[in-house]
């Protein structure tokens, strides 16, 4: 019976090899895979650290399992198989074992500290600073500028120029959240009352998935975002488009959809260039420029948008946006109005 207990580590390794490894390899294709690939200098050192730690753990597990197995198979001649024989050098094995572990662990402490130092600061001055604030359960994204007219506010999407370090200031409006784009950098907590910082840099253009990784309540699993890396020129164009106010020349006073919006939505949502100035929910000035709505939950299509407005509570239980029971007439007018928010 006792021998069976000693088989546990060996079993653990077997299970790792048979079950976990194939899954891990498969998961490497998932959007949130982390230490298997990296796409920027802030993520690369931690990726190597991940590989080294995982590799070393597997090697040590295998060595210990083999030692245990030999010990189990070897025939015992003594009467009490569990006593340590001082004369027979039994203690020496314990000294050697502890010694080796200590040396390896010390080495890892030094290596991990070097990695921390490497990713603490970007290699050059950040090209821009973005402030991201975590809300239950979405992200406000702000590009600050000395001139308030150049200030950009958007949600759940971070646009960055490729190949340049970007400093991110992390805040929280309510509880603790954590910001993580696995392919671009390690994770950083967003703590109410504090401003934490991290930097990211993407080597190639593309879309990188991010996720809140600090349990923050009912909507935590649906608190995603995307980092969209593009060429510096495309990034400038995007900024110019975001700086514009909504619907230049649009006559709001007679629009029935605008009336519905002002009655039902403007307490929480802002649209720059109109009287809607709510701050509880995402800024909707350029709603249709976003790929997704509700923090990565739905692709941004008119069908999804309509569903979201009428059934936010079913789609994202607990969401801070209520369901709206609008008449066919009202929702049609509202949808038409929202379709102008490019
Ligand atoms: C009580 C505040 C509140 C009201 C009123 C409200 N919303 Fe929201 N809305 C929110 C919050 C909070 C979110 C973010 C929800 C999330 O992703 O978890 C949101 C998200 C959204 C989004 C998705 C935005 C994005 O970029 O992800 C849209 C679109 C939206 N609301 C439209 C409306 C419309 C249209 C109305 C009026 C019919 C409305 N909202 C009324 C609070 C509100
Ligand atoms: Cu969370």
Image (cartoon, helix red, strand yellow):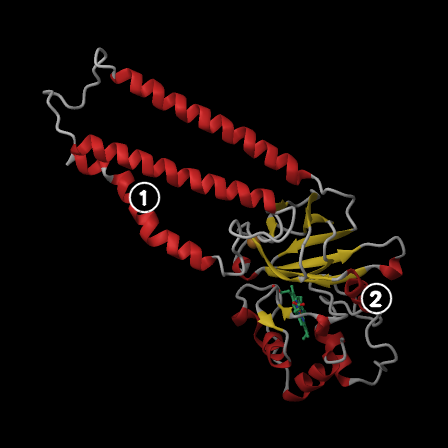
Residue 63 picture location, percent across and down: 32, 35
Vertical side of 146 occupied by 253: above or below: below
Residue furthest top as drawn? 87
Q: In the structure shown, which secondary structural element does the residue marked by tag 2 occupy?
A: helix
Residue 185 picture location, percent across and down: 62, 48
Name the front one of labels 1 and 2. 1
> Looking at the image, which residue is at 60% across and 77% down?
304
Q: Which mark is residue 240?
A: 2
- Quadrant of the snapshot with the N terminus: top left
> Looking at the image, which residue is at 54% across and 67% down?
316
Residue 191 picture location, percent across and down: 64, 45
> Looking at the image, which residue is at 59% across and 65% down?
296
Is 287 displayed left or right of 92 in the figure? Answer: right
| Quarter of the image where one finds residue 45 | top right
Residue furthest bottom as drawn? 329
Q: CA distance from mark 1 to mark 2?
A: 55 Å
- Quadrant of the snapshot with the C terminus: bottom right
Residue 121 picture location, percent across and down: 70, 40
Vertical side of 316 occupied by 14: above or below: above
**Which quarter holds ligand 2?**
bottom right
Q: In the structure shown, which secondary structural element does the residue marked by tag 1 occupy?
A: helix
């Amino acid at each position: 019976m006792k021998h069976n207990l000693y088989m546990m580590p060996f079993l653990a390794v077997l299970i790792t090899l048979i079950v976990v490894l194939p899954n891990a390899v498969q998961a490497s294709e998932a959007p949130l895979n982390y230490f298997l690939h990296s796409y920027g200098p802030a993520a690369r050192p931690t990726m190597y650290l991940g590989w080294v730690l995982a590799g070393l753990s597997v090697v040590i597990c295998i060595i210990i399992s083999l030692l245990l197995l030999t010990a189990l198979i070897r025939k015992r001649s003594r009467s009490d198989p569990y006593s340590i024989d001082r004369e027979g050098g039994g203690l020496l094995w314990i000294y050697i074992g502890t010694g080796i572990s200590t040396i390896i662990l010390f080495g890892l402490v030094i290596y991990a500290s070097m990695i921390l130092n490497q990713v603490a600061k970007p290699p050059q001055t950040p090209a821009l600073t973005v402030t991201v604030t975590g809300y239950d359960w979405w992200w406000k994204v702000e590009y600050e500028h000395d001139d308030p007219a150049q200030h950009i506010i958007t949600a759940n999407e971070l646009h960055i120029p490729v190949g340049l370090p970007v400093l991110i200031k992390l805040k929280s409006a309510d509880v603790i959240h954590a910001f993580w784009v696995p392919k671009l950098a390690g994770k950083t907590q967003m703590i109410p009352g504090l401003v934490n910082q991290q930097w990211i840099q993407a080597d190639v253009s593309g879309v990188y998935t991010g996720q809140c990784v600090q349990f923050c309540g009912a909507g935590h699993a649906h608190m995603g975002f995307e980092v969209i890396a593009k060429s510096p020129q495309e990034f400038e164009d995007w900024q110019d488009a975001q700086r514009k106010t909504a619907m230049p020349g649009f006559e709001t006073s007679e629009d029935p959809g605008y009336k519905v919006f002002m009655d039902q939505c403007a307490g929480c949502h802002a649209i720059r260039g109109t009287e809607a100035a709510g701050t509880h929910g995402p800024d909707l000035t350029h709603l249709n420029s976003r790929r997704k709505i509700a923090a990565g939950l739905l692709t941004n299509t008119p069908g999804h948008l309509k569903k979201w407005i009428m059934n936010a509570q079913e789609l994202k239980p607990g969401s801070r946006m209520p369901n709206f029971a609008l008449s066919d007439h009202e929702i049609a007018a509202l949808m038409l109005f929202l379709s102008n928010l490019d």
